[in-house]
Image (tube, rainbow, N blue to C red):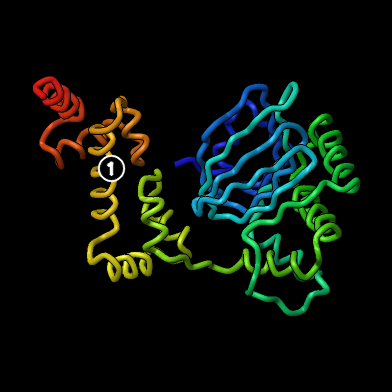
Amino acid sequence: MVLIPQRLFTDPQVRIILQDGNTCILSKELSKPKINKQGYISNHAISIVLSGEQHIRTYEDQLIKVKAGEALFVPRGMYYVSDLLPSGDNFKSVLFYFDDALIQEFLSTSRVSAFSREEVPDHIKFQQVPAIKLFTESLLHIYQDYRIRNKNFLNLKILELLHLINGQVKEQKLADFLFRLTLPKKRNIKSFMEKNYDKPLKIEDYAYLTGRSLSSFRRDFKAFYDITPQQWIKEKRLTKAVTLFQNKNLSVADVSYQVGYENTSYFIKEFKRKVGLSPKQYQLSLHRNNLDN
């Protein structure tokens, strides 16, 4: 499973500006498109797009487009598929990842005393007003170009950005959005699992993404399906694999990936347990049947 920002720390197209664990500020630059990159955001994230365009498809089938001159604020726990599309020479963005402690510190200084849980957006997209643009440019110049790596500046810079966003977004709306980020969000297990059983997620990830502890997720899942999550997911994935082999000319590795198995060898073992044939043997049997018909 691709965890963000953790995976980005070793990405050659990403530069670390400031970092303290998974709280960090990063810059990304690439000259070729990156399509269908899947990830699971483990910290709240703000993406400021400097050039090019980013498309994000969420697990709730929502498409979010962020163009140069725009920024996006999304919560942790989002599973997404992203396209990064250069315009002209490169795609460039600056990324901020932070946890609930920073949000609570920001909210403690807010003039908003009461928070609403109703009609709060799932994300906030906003324009890079001159103040945010200058903030981003100075951040890159001072901390990236001059290689200042003192993590004591990290929380201060993220808090500064939140205060700048507060001048761009209605204060009550931002406060409500931030407050909700610190609360667990329960999602309907049945609809969520039907859409996402073929994602390369662990049971712990499914629990987190549906706003539950691992024990409550197992309990609620059993109440819906009368079967354990592991058994249900395995059956759904392998049934989909059989359908893909029957209807599409795909490699074993492609099918393994499309049904949520990152380890192809493990997929082959599980498939053979279910069908009685290895994926290759099953493909050959389908081919022979087609010739006979």
Q: Quadrant of residue 254?
A: top left
Q: Which amino acid does label 1 sit on?
A: Lys
191 vs 53: above or below: below
Q: Quadrant of residue 253?
A: top left
Would residue 52 appear left or right of 22 to someone viewing this image?
right
Quadrant location of the N terminus in the rendered image:
top left
- Location of residue 182 in the rendering, given as x and y in whole percent from the top left corner: 61, 66
Which sits in the foreground, 203 or 186? Answer: 186
269 vs 176: above or below: above
229 vs 293: above or below: below
Which sits in the foreground, 188 or 201? Answer: 188
- Location of residue 71 in the rendering, given as x and y in whole percent from the top left corner: 74, 46
116 vs 186: above or below: below
Residue at (58, 29) in percent of width and height: 34
- Location of residue 161 in the rendering, given as x and y in whole percent from the top left corner: 80, 52
Disc count in the image? Answer: 1
Provide the secondary structure element on which disc 1 rests. helix
Q: Quadrant of residue 11?
A: top right
- Location of residue 288 in the rendering, given as x and y in whole percent from the top left corner: 12, 22
Residue at (31, 26) in percent of width and height: 250
Can you identify the residue that label 1 sits on?
240
Would residue 157 appear left or right of 203 to someone viewing this image?
right
Residue at (16, 27) in percent of width and height: 286
Would residue 280 appear left or right of 165 to someone viewing this image?
left
Q: Which residue lies furthest to the front in this view?
A: 293
